Image (tube, helix red, strand yellow):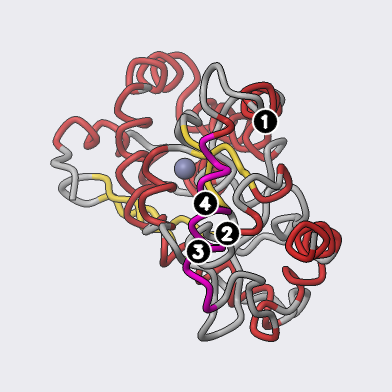
Amino acid sequence: MGVRSGIIDAYGDYEDVLRDIRRFTSLAHGSDALTKALLGNYALLDKGRPLEGLRNSIFQTALSRDSRCPLCERSQVCALDHFLPKSNFPEYSILADNLIPVCERCNRLKGDEFGRADGLLMFHAYFDEFPDIEILLAEIEVESTVSVRYSLHQSDEIDNSTFKRVEKQFKVLDLFGFYQMEAVAELTDQIDLYDQTYDSCGDTGLRSILGALARGAERKGVNHWKAALYRALSRNQEFCGGGYRKLLAAPMT
Ligand SMILES: [Zn+2]
C-alpha cells in the first residue's frame, strides 16, 4: 500500500517535478526491486495488454499535429518517448502525461537526457509552449551553390533560462544540421516552381511566392524551420534574382 500511495502522490507532483527537476529524487531511488517492478508496468501498453488503449489514444493526439514529431517538427511520430526517462523515474513509466509521441530520430538522440546537471529540460509537448518570438534564423549563401545555415539569436523578450532550454534542445537533437539538410532537399524539390515563377514574374514574383510560403509555415510557429527558411529566402536578392538555379549544383554540405 505504501508504494501504491507513493506513486499516486508522485503522479500528483508531476508538474512540480518538471518545474524543478534537480530537487526531485525518484521514489524508486536505491531500490532495484521497485525499479524493476515499475519498469515492468510499461509492457502493459503492448498490443493485447490491459493498457493498449492508452498507447493508442496517445498516438491519436499526434494526429492533431499532422503526426509530426513535436521535438523536431519534421518527421513522423513512431515511438513513445518518456519525457522523464523511465530508467531514472520508473514511477512515471506509464503516466500518460510523461509519454510523448515522437519520431525515431528524436527518441534515439534524446535518450535518457533530463537535465540532472543543469536543471534544463527540453520542451514538454503537453506543458510547454515553444517561444513565439522570432529566435531561429536561417542564413542563405548563394555562391557556387546555395547553402543554408541555421542559428539561434537571443531576444530581450525571452528570459535566459527559456533561451537556454531552446539551445539545449537544438544541441541534444542536432537540429541545426538536421534542418540544414532538410532545407536544401526541400528547395531542390521546388526548383521547377521557382523557374516558372521567375520566368513569368521575375524576382518580384519569386519574392512574393517565398513570402507566402513563409507566412504559411509561420502558422506552425514563427520558429518553425520552414518559416525561418522562407523568410530568409524571400529577403535574399541573389536567390530571388536567379541564384536559386545554383541549387542544382548543390552537393549537400
Ligand atoms: Zn523528431
Q: In the image, residue 33 lies at what x, y percent?
A: 50, 64
* Residue 33, numbered circle: 3
Asked whether residue 63 is in view, the answer is no
Residue marked by disc 2:
90
* Residue 58, numbered circle: 1
Is the C-beta separation of discs 4 and 2 under 8 Å?
yes
- The magenta region covers 30-43
Q: Of discs 4 and 3, which sits in the foreground?
A: 3
Q: Residue furthest front?
A: 1
Distance CA(mark 4)–CA(mark 1): 19 Å
Query: Which residue is found at the position 50% from the left and 31% from the top?
Result: 77
Q: Residues within 10 Å of mark 3 (few under 14, many from 20)?
A: few
Left or right: residue 238 versus residue 23 is left
Residue marked by disc 4:
39
Q: Name the amino acid, label 3.
A: Ala
- N-term mark: 2 or 3: 3
- N-term mark: 4 or 3: 3
Q: Name the amino acid, label 4.
A: Leu
Distance CA(mark 1)–CA(mark 2): 19 Å
15 or 211, which is in the foreground? 15
Distance CA(mark 1)–CA(mark 3): 28 Å
Q: Of discs 1 and 2, which sits in the foreground?
A: 2
